[in-house]
Structures are given as C-alpha cells and as structure tokens.
Image (spheres, rainbow, N blue to C red):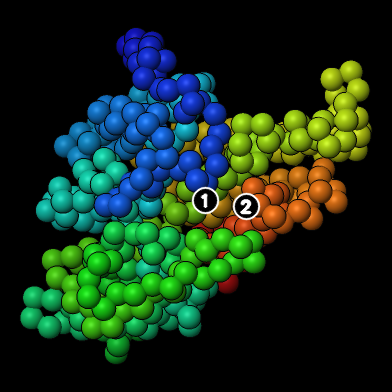
Amino acid sequence: MMEKFRQETRDWLDAKCPQSMRSPGSEKDALWGGRAAKHPSQDAKDWLDAMVSKGWTCPTWPKEYGGGLSHEENMILQSELRRINARPPLISFGISMLGPVLLEYGTEEQKLEYLPKIMRGEIRWCQGYSEPGAGSDLASLQTRAVVDGDDYIVNGSKVWTSYADHADWIFCLVRTDTDAPKHEGISFILFDMASPGVTTKPIQLISGSSPFCETFFDDVRVPRKNLVGQENQGWVIAKKLLQYERNMISGMGTRSGAKGPQRSMENQAKLQLGETNGKIANPDIREEICRHKMDGQAFALTRQRAAEESKSSSVPSPASSMFKYYGTELNKSRFELLLEIFGSQSLRWEDDSTITREWLRSRANSIEGGTSEIQLNVMAKRVLGLPD
C-alpha cells in the first residue's frame, strides 16, 4: 500500500513541481503568503497552488482543515520532496508554530476560521512573545489585556517580533491577572495587526537587514473569542509553541550550504582556493568541510530517527531544545567555515548576498527561539533529569 502511495506521489511531484522550484532559493525567493502576498515568480505561484490542492502544505493536519496524510504517508512525501530538492511552497509561522497549537488548544470555531487560511497561505502571522524587560525570563512579560465587555483592551509592547511589519495577524502573550504568580496570569490571544492602536518599527541589524520589529499596542480592542485555551493558562500553550518553534529553527542545521544553488561549501572552496584532480586544493579546508558534512548528515539522521520514533504523534518534546541547540551551532559553524574559505573576499559589503551579511545574521540563531543557555537548561532538567 505504501509503495503504491510512494509511486503516485513521485509521479505527481515530477509532473507538478516546476524545475525552477527544485533548487535552493534565496530569502527573496521565499513565499510567506498573507493578504499582501507577492509571488516571486509564476512558478512559485503554480507550485503553491498545486501543493494547496493536495493539502500538502500541512499534510498531517486533519482532513477537515486541509491535510489528511498519515504519519507514514507524510514520511514518504517528505522523502520524495527531498529527492527532487523541492523548495517549500510556503513559509509560515502559522504552519510551523500556531497551527499545531490551535489543533491542540483551539476551539472548533477557531480551527475552522484559521487553519484552512494558514494552509492556503491566505494569512501571515507574527509572534508576540519577547518584551524589552522579558526575554529569557519570558514569564515576566507586562503587556496587559483588561476585560471590557466582550473585548480585551491590550496595552504594552513587544520586541524582536519577526516580520511584524509584514504580518496580518499576531499570536500574542498578554498578562490578564496582575495579582497571580507570574506564570499563572498569562493568556494567549490572537488579533489582527490592522487593528487601531497597533504600530510596528523595524530594527536594523548589524547585517544590514531588518527582519525584526518593535511592536506597540495602545488600547487595542481584541474580541474575547480570540482567546486560545483558558484565561490565565496561556503559559502552558506558550511553552508548547516554543517547542514547535525550536524544532523549526533546528532545521537550519541540515542545510548544505549558503543561499543559492551554486553556493555549496565545496563549490565555493574550489572557486576560491582552486582544485587538484577534482578535489579542493587546500587539504585542511577539505578536511574541515568533510567533517562538517558528516556532522550535518549525522544530525539529519538523528532528527529523522526522532520523527520515526514518534509515529503516534508529531508533537515535539523537550528534546526539541537539543535539536535547536545543535542545529543553530551547526549553522553558525558553517558560516565560520565559509568565511575561512572566502578569506579577504569576505570583507565585501556592497551587495546583500555577501557571506559576511549571512554570517552576521547567523549569530542571532543562538538567541532567537530561546537562547542557547536556555536550551542547555531545558536539556539538563527535562531531558537528562538533572537536579536544579
């Protein structure tokens, strides 16, 4: 039965995935969806439309919300997508973080309202977690939501809100009980970024890009029906969503090289350092690249084994902290190695595609989604069971 599904999937992908979608793309090639979505190319639009028609942007979600594949079928689908080196048809915090949380904690009304739109790429989300005074100690957040009839009135601010200036909606942690212990007075709500009182301000990074924002809420009115889960019980949801986020971020550790189809470390090393008999001329760099590829392959196999061992559930465990930690360290070391390969050429700054800009951006990997120090604490306490 599974072999028949594999062959049908292979035939469909071979017919539907455009050739231009079968190679790594740059950040500008990514399709995030949303109300103001712009397709980077007709092929990108066709690829998204095809995957949406099969429900394969969110293949394991229940069929009534757009998916319907079993765990085994999804493993085959992912294998076949890797076989043709297919790009993701849609990048979405709704898919990787919010959707799984709604499946577990959302009302049926919320699931029917948001999940199909997420699956089709019709709504783009951002995450309202960190605040100027609540980063690693997230439970100290002070953004408040006060009940006013059928609404909450939200006041406060968030920081490091990824792509908030492009998002349609936000999933946000707010304090709904100021007298309760800090972990017990938090709620998880959803609201439209076009609501009166919401403003964003991009933060320019040392790399020159501005993917993060400061986000401000001034008397923002949010319907109480947009509360996910129980009031004052949002910390449980927040922790679960962080596991999904960390699992997503860990995936960067399995990438084979920098952006673009011709920018693998091997190709760049041959271009920059020369080659002898088809091999990188510098034996030390050749050894470092080989070691990095072995580490990456071992990490990819470990993630795959973990996925196969959790056949009964796609819900991540605290072990996602281990994957997030190692994946981000692997990504950072890749760019360190690329800098070594490029040597003085790494000093170029005149365009957005320089290795130096990507290297600088990679430094944030050990901060976003929870710092590496936080991940080590989670691993010690919840994976290894060590005492406080």
Which of pointers 1 and 2 indicates the residue nearer the eye?
Answer: 2
| Residue 133, horizontal then vertical, whole percent | 48, 83
Answer left or right for 114 relative to 92.
left
Q: Which mark is residue 182?
A: none
| Residue 105, horizontal then vertical, whole percent | 24, 56
The residue identified by callout 1 is 249
> Which badge, 1 or 2, is on the more N-terminal residue?
1
Local crowd at mark 1 within 10 Å, few (<14), some, or many (≥20)?
Answer: many
Looking at the image, residue 251 lies above or below residue 78? below
Could you say which is closer to the camera, residue 143 or residue 263?
A: 263
* Quarter of the picture holding the N terminus: top left
Answer left or right for 292 relative to 308.
right
Kind of residue at disc 2: Asp
Please name the residue shown 88% across and 26% down the image.
Answer: 275
| Residue 188, horizontal then vertical, whole percent | 28, 68
The residue identified by callout 2 is 352
| Residue 366, horizontal then vertical, whole percent | 61, 60
Determine whether the residue tagged by mark 1 lies in a helix, strand or loop.
helix
Could you say which is closer to the camera, residue 23 or residue 226?
A: 23
Q: Looking at the image, can residue 155 be seen?
A: yes
* Label 1 to label 2: alpha-carbon separation: 22 Å
Looking at the image, residue 220 lies above or below residue 260? below
Please name the residue shown 35% across and 24% down the image.
Answer: 73
